[in-house]
Image (cartoon, rainbow, N blue to C red):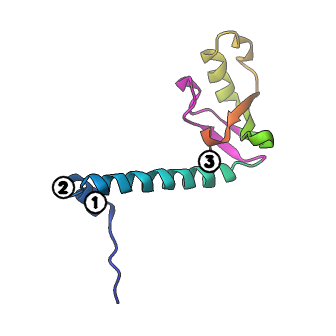
Amino acid sequence: MTTATLELPDVIGFVSDRAEHDDLDALGRALKARRKALRERDMAKVIKNAPVITFNLRPPHFNGLTGVVKLVDTTGGKKRATVTLDKGSTTRYAQASPGNEYLIGQEFYDLENVPLACLRVIGS
């Protein structure tokens, strides 16, 4: 017995050319479930001392900041972390945040209450 392996172009071709409403509904549910599984997997990697980069934050100029996880808080249903930003990210944060200009030139800054879903471990 052989099993067929679909490649991404095959899937895209099917969706583009032949998928019906029910197919697209099923794909939508599968995509949502897969994204949730990946998000949970990625959040589990965010542990103390892990190097991370921020993404999907608002305002968007807070995306791309790098640092090290100082603390992970999952109490009360929260899934948040404190990230000690490196010098370059501390400067970027200070320049983008009115009232935080005093941080320019600082070696680090503890960015608190960052959702774990908005952190990606660097190098994983």
Describe the element under mark 1 as helix, strand or loop: helix
- Residue labelled with disc 2: 17
Mark found first going from the N terminus, 1 or 3? 1
Query: Which region is colored magenta?
Result: 48-67
| Residue type, mark 1 in image | Pro
Percent from the top left, x then y, of residue 12?
Answer: 28, 56
Examine the rendered structure and indicate whether residue 82 appears above or below residue 34: above
Occupied quadrant, residue 112 = top right
Percent from the top left, x then y, of residue 92?
Answer: 62, 23
Mark found first going from the N terminus, 2 or 1? 1
Is 22 inside the magenta-drawn segment? no
Mark seen at residue 42: none
Quarter the N terminus occupies: bottom left
Describe the element under mark 2 as helix, strand or loop: helix
Badge 3 density bin: few <14, some 14–19, many ≥20, Cα 10 Å = some
- Residue labelled with disc 3: 122
Give the residue drawn at x 49%, y 55%.
Answer: 34
Badge 1 density bin: few <14, some 14–19, many ≥20, Cα 10 Å = few
Badge 2 density bin: few <14, some 14–19, many ≥20, Cα 10 Å = few
Quarter the C terminus occupies: bottom right
Q: Nearer the viewer, mark 2 or mark 1?
A: 2
Alpha-carbon span between mark 1 and mark 3: 28 Å
- Residue labelled with disc 1: 9
| Residue type, mark 3 in image | Ile
Front residue of 19/74: it is 19
Is 50 inside the magenta-drawn segment? yes
Percent from the top left, x then y, of residue 26?
Answer: 37, 56
Alpha-carbon span between mark 2 and mark 3: 37 Å
For the residues bearing labels 1 and 3, Cβ distance under 8 angstroms? no
| Residue type, mark 2 in image | Asp
Q: Is residue 3 visible?
A: yes
